[in-house]
Image: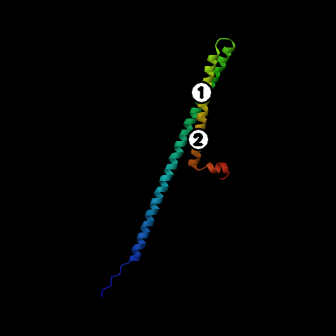
Amino acid sequence: GVELIIPFEKKAQKSDERIAQLNLKKTQIEYEQRKDDIKKEVEVAWLQLQNLQEQISQASQVLDLEKNKLAAKEKDFRLGRTDANQVILFQQDVIQAQVQYLQLQSQFSAVQIQLELAVGNLLSKYNGAS
């Protein structure tokens, strides 16, 4: 009789190698995608920080202006040139400017934390690890 020998072991080994290569390639692609995602997260957070810094600077200037206007209005009140209602309106303007300034500072802190998380420095920063 005729014997036919089929090398199943080699086919199985080649199949396993091919699966391993495909899994490795998939893992490499996922790694690169995650690396790109992190890079984008860092860039977005960095741009947000820069924008918020500018907004905080502007809000600080507005707050200073509102405080100066209030001080002038209070002086006018002491001199009898204006009434209490006008002073109250200027006080409300100062309060609104303070709220805006504090909200921007809060947003800045939140974005700063997002940036630290994206970069991976948050835990080492507060645990003293490097």
Is label 2 in a helix, a strand or a loop? helix
Total number of numbered labels?
A: 2
Residue 21 tag number: none
**x then y, percent, for residue 79:** 69, 12
Residue 96 tag number: 1
Residue drawn at (47%, 56%) of the image = 30
Which label lies toward us, 2 or 1? 1
Residue type at numbered disc 2: Ala
Q: Residue 82 is drawn in which quadrant?
A: top right
Q: Does 100 appear above or below 25?
A: above
Residue drawn at (45%, 66%) of the image = 20
Q: Check the image and name the residue furthest to the front.
A: 85
Residue type at numbered disc 1: Gln
Q: Does 4 appear above or below 60?
A: below
Report the quarter where the N terminus lies. bottom left
Residue drawn at (63%, 22%) of the image = 91
Q: Is residue 65 visible?
A: no
Which residue was labeled with disc 2?
110
**x then y, percent, for residue 23:** 45, 63
Please tell me which residue lies in front, 97 or 37. 97
